[in-house]
Amino acid sequence: MAATIYRGTLNGTGSNYFATLYENTTGKNARLVWSYVKAFSPNPATDAEFYVGTTSNPDHNNGNDLETWFFSLTSGHSAGKWLSTMHGSDKNSDHMYGGSSGSFPTEFYVPNTEKVFVKISGNFSLNNYALMYNFVAITED
């Protein structure tokens, strides 16, 4: 079992773009464990969209690219394995969920030859923070 750490910051460009966060070229399945990911808030607010599979632009409506799945992280929120925060004296968790259902998968598998993409909104101005991430890819032996 081998592990590789991936981390970085993506900035806005003023245009929509897709970034490849991970490409599995190991010849085996890989498990991704997200230690931290934060989606910043552009104006107007737009969620960070993640795609896992063979394409960043799946054509699901026509029955194509069905191996690609996607989820989103609500703008202004963070997620991560074992991540928790407390807010003020009310002791409520703060910014601990993503997507419209309140979930972000902090651990999932990526088959060989598939990728993890993220769509960065054009609502982010040039060089404004859009996304920060830290995850580990663990090759399954």
Image (cartoon, rainbow, N blue to C red):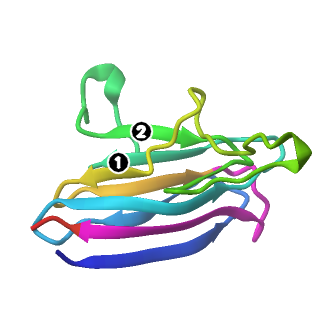
- The Cα atoms of the two marked residues, 1 and 2, are separated by 6 Å
Q: Amino acid at mark 2?
A: Phe
Question: CB under 8 Å between callouts 1 and 2?
Answer: yes
Q: Is residue 94 above or below residue 120?
A: above
Q: Which residues are magenta?
A: 121-138
Q: Which residue is mark 1?
A: 52
Q: Is residue 17 left or right of residue 67?
A: right
Q: Position of residue 20 (x, y in %)?
A: 42, 63
Q: Amino acid at mark 1?
A: Val
Q: Is residue 103 above or below residue 52?
A: above
The residue sitting at 73% across, 55% down in the picture is 40
Q: Is residue 137 above or below residue 14?
A: below
Ranked by sequence position, the earlier of labels 1 and 2 is: 1
Q: Position of residue 109 (x, y in %)?
A: 26, 52
Q: Which residue is mark 2?
A: 70
Q: Position of residue 77 (x, y in %)?
A: 69, 48
Q: Is residue 114 left or right of residue 141?
A: right
Give the quarter of the figure containing the N terminus: bottom left
